[in-house]
């Protein structure tokens, strides 16, 4: 059977359990210090400490190891910084080789992995902050302890929303910021230094703001429109077509109402969301009929999300002008 990564949309934004990282740490393969919430690794943060920070920490690897963080998404925006070594970072269909002083920026809707699955010697810092969004069109809401001026925070947010370059190579000025954060996290393993960490995080965002202001960054407002959120959803729907989706669930996942969902879906596909889902299911079924010649037609229909064999046969014949069985036989003749 083909592998379908990240198929569960209801868990798509849950914190990465980082099982491989935790196991490697527990077996003494590396040093890892972190503070986190929910399923993220490290010392658990109290409710009122570093509010809206899901995870912050670092790992220090001394020798090459066969583990990595598999494909996942995060609830918030993630910043990572590699202070030493080299490391493979993948986002969508792109793969990058991170070098010292590279930093990455990953939004909640961006599927990514770290390691391939090899993790090479080096030190990696990370921070995941909840900014109140899961989709590109939603407005950002930073934690209230971020003290950048309204103008500066608006500019930083604009750059992070309207430019999705995943890897930045000239982050030397961020090294001291992440190093100090790392020291504070290590000290916080006994008692979390809430005030100090907030100051250091604000300083990090200020340095990042300075880098963005110095560079010539191309901004694209279309990255933040409703249409893009629907486009992302329709793309990932291809990995979760067998689920018993309703319009309400689709709209809820996209963070908008049914009317808006239908409008933008028609604009992109000329189909309603449900009809587009049926189209995906039929395309998947057609592929399985050819790939698995001995599998029962009814079994394939159920696997692709159809609630009855009769409905599957009717819908299939309407699209391909042949019953599933005859479709399979016609391809055998060729």
Image (spheres, rainbow, N blue to C red):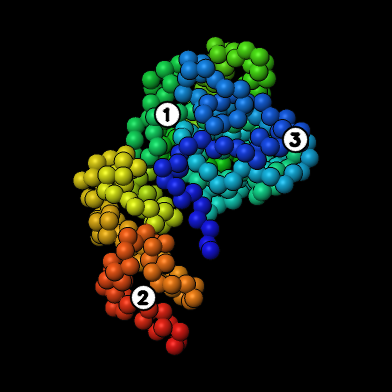
Sooner in the amino-acid sequence: mark 3 or mark 2: 3
**In the image: residue 214, left or right of residue 254:** right
Q: Nearer the viewer, residue 69 or 232?
A: 69
Sooner in the amino-acid sequence: mark 2 or mark 1: 1
Say which residue label 2 marks: 324
Say which residue label 1 marks: 131
Image vertical order of residue 183 relative to residue 14, above or below: above
Sooner in the amino-acid sequence: mark 3 or mark 1: 3
Q: Position of residue 284 (x, y in %)?
A: 41, 65
Disc marking residue 73:
none
Q: Position of residue 323 (x, y in %)?
A: 32, 77
Residue at (40%, 37%) from the top-left corner?
A: 134
Q: Bin the neighbour count of mark 1 within 10 Å (Cα to Cα): few under 14, some 14-19, many 20 and up.
A: some
The answer for how far apart the CA atoms under marks 3 and 2 are is: 52 Å
Residue at (48%, 37%) from the top-left corner?
A: 14
Image vertical order of residue 193 relative to residue 61, above or below: above
Farthest right residue?
63
Residue at (27%, 71%) from the top-left corner?
A: 314
**Secondary element type, mark 2:** helix
Q: Nearer the viewer, residue 186 or 298?
A: 298
Q: Position of residue 267 (x, y in %)?
A: 25, 55
**In the image: residue 299, left or right of residue 230:** right
Q: Quadrant of residue 235?
A: bottom left
Say which residue label 3 marks: 27
Q: Position of residue 173 (x, y in %)?
A: 62, 27
Q: Is residue 270 visible?
A: yes
The answer for how far apart the CA atoms under marks 3 and 1 are is: 34 Å
């Amino acid at each position: 059977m083909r592998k379908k990564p990240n198929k569960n949309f209801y868990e798509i934004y849950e914190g990465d359990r980082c099982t491989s990282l935790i196991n490697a740490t527990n077996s003494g393969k590396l040093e890892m210090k972190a503070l986190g919430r929910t399923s993220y690794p490290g010392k658990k943060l109290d409710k009122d400490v570093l509010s809206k920070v899901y995870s912050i920490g670092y790992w220090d690897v001394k020798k090459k190891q066969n583990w990595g963080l598999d494909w996942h998404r995060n609830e918030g925006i993630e910043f990572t910084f590699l202070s030493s070594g080299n490391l493979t970072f993948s986002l969508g269909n792109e793969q990058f080789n991170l070098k010292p002083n590279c930093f990455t920026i990953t939004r909640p809707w961006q599927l990514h992995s770290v390691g391939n699955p090899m993790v090479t010697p080096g030190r990696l810092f990370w921070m995941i902050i909840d900014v109140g969004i899961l989709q590109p069109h939603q407005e950002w809401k930073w934690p209230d302890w971020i003290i950048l001026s309204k103008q500066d925070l608006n500019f930083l947010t604009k750059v992070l929303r309207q430019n999705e370059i995943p890897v930045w190579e000239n982050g030397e000025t961020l090294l001291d910021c992440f190093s100090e954060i790392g020291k504070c996290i290590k000290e916080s393993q006994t008692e979390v230094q809430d005030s100090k960490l907030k100051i250091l995080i604000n300083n990090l965002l200020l340095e990042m703001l300075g880098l963005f202001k110095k560079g010539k960054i191309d901004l694209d407002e279309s990255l933040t429109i409703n249409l893009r959120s629907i486009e992302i959803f329709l793309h990932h729907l291809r990995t979760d077509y067998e689920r018993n989706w309703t319009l309400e669930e689709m709209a809820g996942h996209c963070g908008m109402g049914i009317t808006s969902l239908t409008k933008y879906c028609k604009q992109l596909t000329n189909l309603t969301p449900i009809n587009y889902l049926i189209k995906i299911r039929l395309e998947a079924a057609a592929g399985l009929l050819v790939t698995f010649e001995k599998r029962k037609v009814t079994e394939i229909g159920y696997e692709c999300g159809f609630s009855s064999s009769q409905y599957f046969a009717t819908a299939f014949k309407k699209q391909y002008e042949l019953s599933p069985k005859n479709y399979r036989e016609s391809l055998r003749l060729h």
